[in-house]
Amino acid sequence: MAGIEVTALHKRYPDGTVAVEHVDLSIGDGELFVMLGPSGCGKTTTLRAIAGLERQTTGDIRIGDTLVNDLPPAERDIAMVFQFYALYPHLRTRDNLAFPLRAEGLPKPEVEDRVAEAARLMRLGPLLDRRPNRLSGGEQQRVALARALVRRPRAFLMDEPLTNLDAELRADMRTEIKHLQGELGTTMVYVTHDQVEAMSLGHRIAILNKGRVEQIGTPLEVYDRPASLFCAAFIGSPPMNLIEVEVADGKLRSKGGLVLTPPPGLPRDRSLVAGVRPEALEVTEPGAEGSVPARVVSAEWLGDEIIYVVDYGGQRDVRVRMPLTVRFATDAPVGLRHTGGPPVVYDVNTEELVA
Amino acid sequence: MAVSVDEAVSTGPVRDRTPAARRFGGRGRSVLEIALLTVLAVVMLFPVLWMIETSIKENRDVYAIPAKFFDFTVTLDHFKDVFVASGGGRSTLSVAFLNSVVVAGVSTVLATVLGVPAAWAYSRFSVKAKKDQLFFILSTRFMPPVVVVIPIFLMYRQVGLIDTKLGLILIYAAFNVPFTIWMMKGFVDEVPAEYEDAAMLDGYTRLQAFWKFTLPLLVPGIAATAVFALIFSWNEFVFAIFLTSSDTVRTAPPAIAGLIGGTTVDWGLVAAASVVFALPVLVFAYLVRKHLIAGVTLGAVRR
């Protein structure tokens, strides 16, 4: 086991595309580290550079104390799980698991022991004699995980391993991966574009955008204080409401009259945007104390809560999370008020967090 | 519940009428289809049929007027003449057939050996101006062979490749490599690159990964591509007739064409030689027909 250090990683393809602009990561030993971002943000390229499947243009990668820049993938002592599983189609599960060990030249009894152990961990017993085309997507992914396990690598690299599974199975596998990582204590770098997956799995999350790291932090830090407008819009479902505000009389005021408690240390001379989570707002009866007049545009009934989309005073599509007990009809005139603490505030021009 | 209501509403006659109309439409269409296809088949197959008939007729029946369709004596003499010279020993035609086998076979192997790895490289790696390169490769096939035959002739004369099998092999391979690259690229694109990535993590080099994991999955595509390349080389006429002259080098198409001319034409021999010439490709295409269809629908069409 080992930590992974990525320093000033830059990847430019021969055709001129820059996949990774500049990435620094410091992943701790035994950490489950998630790289999150939209497609094309450079997260997969970064992972493949760590794996050795891509050669970075500049920058250093260390696994443990070893500088691995010039090592081929096989000598980096890592295992990778792919989005399309990449099980060898002509081999049965048993041989798929044994394959990397045989390639290493381990003695036969040890290969068998390790395969049996991995099969037990991932509960693959009945599947051992099937070929990949006789396995369901979930089963294939479990075999792929087991194939990564048998190597006992210093680190696991996961490239969107759950993307091809249906929603229910995905949740199950998520739990399984988290549990497994906790039990083995192996460093894991997990790439995903799904923020729910990132939030539920990661010890820490790195949010990437356009080949750069926008923020690194624990799921809670990332949720509570997104470091940039991009992170604010990316994390959370429904996403954070971004409301243009100005500072007046010691308060944050938005165009429609909504008043927010300002965080300390706000700069005065810049145009600002406040990020307000849907749960920090409240839909009320029209005219309730401290509320501004608003109109319900739509209501999404999610079973345990309702997401109201409201317009008020020129601000459109503000999302509010409400309990099921509070019900308003579409188009109904309502009130909207802020209930949480001071919101996070961003500079419109730099798109960065200012307070 | 809704289903039973529907069933109760729909009465017998209504239910009968719809399928009946559909059945009639189906029959009407299929009759028309069969008629058209029959006409097409007759038009397409008649020359082939006539060739086969001529090849097994005696010479006086070949020239009979009115033509004899069914009532003639069957003979295999023409087929014997294809392979055995009149004074005994090998005929020039049989030498030409052997040349065709060598030239078509070697050039196809050459095109496949060069084209498949190239297709893999174009599919897997990020190459500068990849699209332009691929377009350039394809552009070599834009013009018909006859356009370049004279410059090729002059070049070959300089380097001494005129009237050699090697010359034909090289030019056929050159024509088949672009085709192989384009068709195989489609197939390689279909094979997830992750197999190779996984193999590389398991300790193989990139080339080993390609050889051990991607290549076996490409076999159907390679078979389809190679058959197309083989058919091209086997049937090629223009280069063969311009670039070769001696009987020991000439391939079958110009050799068969050479039978026509002079005062009398032995049509029986021409037909028999043509039948022998057509057979291998037919048999080969039949053997790999599944792969051929896969090649047409999967490899070439997508992307």
Image: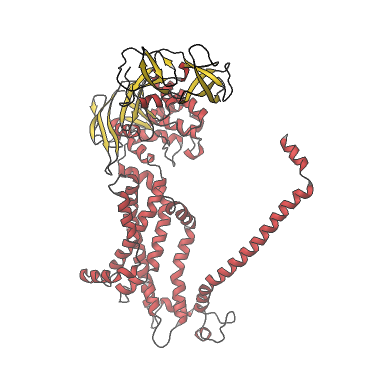
**For this rendering, which residue is in front, B44 or B85?**
B44
**For this rendering, which residue is in front, B80 or B102?**
B102
Where in the figure is residue B134, as x and y percent of width and height? 33, 53
> Going by the image, does B256 lie left or right of A328?
left
The colour scheme is secondary structure
Question: To which quarter of the image does residue A30 belong?
Answer: top left
Residue B88 visible: yes
Where in the figure is residue A355, as x and y percent of width and height? 33, 17
What is the quadrant of the N terminus of chain B in the image? top right
Outermost residue on the left side: it is B158
> Going by the image, does B249 lie left or right of A320?
left
- Residue depicted at 37% across the width and 76% down the height: B255
- Residue depicted at 54% across the width and 74% down the height: B46
- Say if B30 sits above or below B90 in the image: above
Where in the figure is residue A299, as x and y percent of width and height? 55, 25
Question: To which quarter of the image does residue A152 belong?
Answer: top left
Figure disc tally: 0
- Residue depicted at 49% across the width and 40% down the height: A133
- Say if A232 sits above or below B191 in the image: above
Residue A220 visible: no
**For this rendering, which residue is in front, A231 or A4?**
A231
**For this rendering, which residue is in front, A333 or B193?**
A333
- Say if B239 sits above or below A113 in the image: below
